[in-house]
Structures are given as structure tokens and as C-alpha cells.
Amino acid sequence: MTDFSRRDLGKALGAACAATAFGAPAAAQVLKCTDLSFPNGFKWGTATAAYQIEGAVREDGRGPTNWDLFSHTPGKTFNGDTGDVADDSYHRYAEDTQLLKNLGVQTYRMSLAWSRIFPEGRGQPNPRGVDHYKRVIDNLLENGIEPYVTMFHWDLPAALPGGWQNRDTAHAFADYAGYMAGQISDRVKNIMTVNEIRCFTDLGHLVGIHAPGLKLPPAEVNQVRHHGTLAHGLGVQAIRASAKPGTQVGIADNTTFYVPVIETPEHIAAAKKATRELNAMFLTAIMEGRYIDEYLNQQGANAPKVQDGDMKAIASPLDFLALNIYAPEWVRADDSAKGYATIPHIASSPHMASPWLIVGPEVAYWGVRQVSELWKPKVLYISENGASADDPVHDGRIDDADRVMYLRNYITSFRRAVAEGYPLKGYFLWSLMDNFEWADGYSKRFGIHYVDFKTQKRTPKLSAAWYKEVIRRNAVV
Ligand code: GCO
């Protein structure tokens, strides 16, 4: 990879649009800016998560989760929506595989429901749950689609006492992840531990808008965050201990990325510093194996309680890093002690159907570049990127040109990072189909297939046709 810190800006910008090398010089594939192509072997996929698509919440021995309890609590989700049925993908997975096959994707990112395997979070495994996922995975493989499996995408077995407030949950997660890695690593080569620690800790325990709906004081929030990162680290170790040799292990993280408002060296440096410091409790800890001083000083007595060995586990080496990238945060350099200032989003900031989904394609490039420069991961994936849109249906068609606009701009920006030699190897579009969007229930659609939730009919949107062409040509179209 090129060391951009030693380049001046003019050269770096020039490189983005001249012929540049991808990967190791010996195997260099030359990409030109004009054709917007991706390197051979770049993996295209889509992503989903168990609770958002499966339904069948009481079938085959599945135990209840925090999200079952939360969504069934009046007032917690839009319209009281729940994941009880969702896309009914538990029964319709073979149909969904055909949607993937029709798109031409090489890969599919899915998650496993922990409580289908261990209905109470730990104890005796439930063979019906294990067999279900083996069938789903085999069906993908038979259709030439490579599964990337996330072990935990927020659906926590409700029986675990204290949930993420209890350190034991991190150990229970590792036991479950290790067990499942042993079951599936003959067929699954890429495993992600957890999805978006910041969301399942902060949204559930600080802001209270996700399960379990708590608003805890700072010291307790920091402890929950620590248990989340610890679960990831112990999970990496457990997966490595029981998976087949060669299994690639990573994490899907929604690092908050701070994008330089102007591409000059001072703003670029300020934005990188902000990204490192403001993700101190999550990705920075995972990549550096310690809580950095800026975070500890700021938290003071509220800092998390860390036991011997925790940070070593948290920093367990990863084979790849996967990023969920959606909205940017804008940053400028300033002369404060920190050296940066964040710029708030305002009413005129463009956004998609979800108010939080500010449109800023630059975050795609800067996210990949910043983690590459800060921590030099060997392999990077985009584990999620996508957009909510209104999706009106006219004559049976869903012409989501707004989503196509969003995706085209973001993928073009990811391509800039690839063209500059950063190790981005694949992209998973969120999402294959409309699904249960957490607290927003079914009111926000992220799919490139439209789902009629009354009939469960799936209809490809314009964005599906567009993405199919991107994959076919291996280029932005
Ligand atoms: C997340 C989750 C997904 C969401 C998606 C759209 O990032 O919140 O990983 O489950 O549905 O991001 O909000």
C-alpha cells in the first residue's frame, strides 16, 4: 500500500485519476479513473441480519431475545412493529438465494441467531437451529454464492442475566461463537464476530432507542461498551480455537468517520485525528490494544473497569476488518488543543429517507483511507452500505432513482480508495431486501428488492437492475 502521509496533496490527487497500481506491485492491475472499473476478483455481495429478515421467532426451539421483548413493549418501535414474521426468510431462504443468484453476486453476508443455537444463551446446543443454518449455507454454496457469516447482529438471548451489563455475557458469546465456528467452518471461510458495537451498546444503553431500552449513567455505559469489545476479542480467540485452519476472522464495525471538509493537509490530518480519538472505546481499542489517554482522561472516574488480559483479548489479531459506512461527520482543523472541530449537520444537509442518513459519498473514500493509514489492516471489506428511500410503487415498478444516485456516488468513492491501492476487497450492499429496520419497524425500506409485507412478494427495484449491471461489468455504471 502506498504511504500517503509522505505524499503531497497534488501527487495524491493526481494518483487518484492517473493510472495507479492495485495491490502488490508484482501483481499490479492498472485501474484508470475513466472506466470506473474494479480489480478482477473484487467481491460484490449484499447483506442482511437474522432478526431483520427471518421471522419464525418461536420455531424449532429458538429462545426469546432482547429484541423480541423490546419490540413487543408498547411504544418502542414504529407502529409497534416486531420481527415476528419480518421477511419470513426462515422459510423462504431458498427463494432469497435465487434473488442473489439473479443479481450475480459472488458473496452474501448473513447473521446467525444466537438463540436458535443456544435458546438460553448458553448450555446445550439446539440441533434444529444448527441444522437450519447448515441448510441455508449449503443452499448458498450450491448456487455458487460464498457466505460471510456474522455471529451476532444484536439479537441477544433474553435469558442471559443482565445482558451486556454483565461481563459473563462476553464469555457466553465466545462459547457460542466458538461452537458455531466448529459447526460451519467446513463451509464458511469468513466469519465476523459482532456487528456494530457502538449500536448495540450505546443505542441500547445510553440513548435507549434500541433494545434493551436503557439510559444508563456514563460509568455503566462505558462498562457495557467494554463488555461489547471484550465479547468481540474473546470471540476471535474462540473462533480461532475451533474453526478449521485458514478460517478468516474479522469484525463488522460502524466506525464513525470524520471527513475533512476541504482536502488540504491540515484538514486531512485533523479528520484522521478525530476518527482515532472519537472511536477510542471501540475500533481504536480493538486495533491498538489499549484505551488511549484522550479517552481515559476525558472519562476520568467513569472509565471502564478492565481486568488483566482484557486488552490483549480485545486486540486479538484480525484477518480482515469490515466497515459499515453510511453517513459522514464533517471535520475542520482548528486551533483548539484537540486540533479539530466537528461541524454539525443542519436542516439543509441532504439525507435519505432516514433522517440520520446524511448523504456524503466522500466518507466512503476517507473511511477506507483513514483505517488503512491508522492501523494497516491486511484486508478490508465494506460489510454494509446502502440507503433508505420512499419507494413508491407505480404500475408494479419501484423506480428508486434516489437510491441509485446514492449508491453510484458511494461506490465511485470506494473505487477511489481501491484505485489508490488501499486493500478494499469487497462490498456488501445493505440490503438484499426491505426488512425490519429496528426501532423504525417497516417504515424505512433499505432493500434493492421491494417486499410486500402482506404477501411476502419480493420485487426487484430499479436499484437491483442497476447493481446487477455493476456486478456484471465489475465497474460503476
Ligand atoms: C445498522 C445495522 C443494520 C441496519 C442498517 C440500516 O447499521 O444499523 O447493521 O442492521 O438495518 O444499517 O440502518
Image: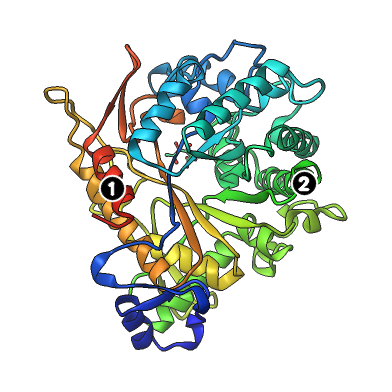
Q: Position of residue 65 (x, y in %)?
A: 63, 22
Displayed quadrant of residue 128: top right
Relative height, residue 115 to residue 378 (above, below): above
Decide if residue 367 is on the left or right side of residue 452. right
Relative height, residue 356 to residue 75 (above, below): below
Q: Which residue is mark 2?
A: 234
Q: CA distance from mark 1 to mark 2?
A: 37 Å
Q: Position of residue 132 (x, y in %)?
A: 61, 20
Q: SS for tag 1?
A: loop
Crowding at dot 1, Cα within 10 Å, few <14 / some 14-19 / many 20+, comes out as: some
Crowding at dot 2, Cα within 10 Å, few <14 / some 14-19 / many 20+, comes out as: many
Residue sitting nearer the eye, 244 or 172: 244
Decide if residue 146 is on the left or right side of residue 157. left
The residue drawn where x is 78% and y is 25% is: 122
Q: Does residue 156 appear anywhere in the picture?
A: yes
Residue sitting nearer the eye, 386 or 189: 189
Task: Pick out the residue farthest to the left.
Answer: 395
Q: How many marks?
A: 2
Relative height, residue 435 to residue 18 (above, below): above
Q: Position of residue 70 (x, y in %)?
A: 55, 22
Looking at the rendered structure, the kind of residue marked 2 is Leu
The residue drawn where x is 50% and y is 83% is: 5
The residue drawn where x is 70% and y is 46% is: 232
The residue drawn where x is 41% and y is 83% is: 265
Q: Which mark is residue 351?
A: 1
Q: Does residue 343 appear anywhere in the picture?
A: no
Task: Pick out the residue farthest to the right.
Answer: 308
Displayed quadrant of residue 151: top right
Q: Position of residue 119 (x, y in %)?
A: 71, 19
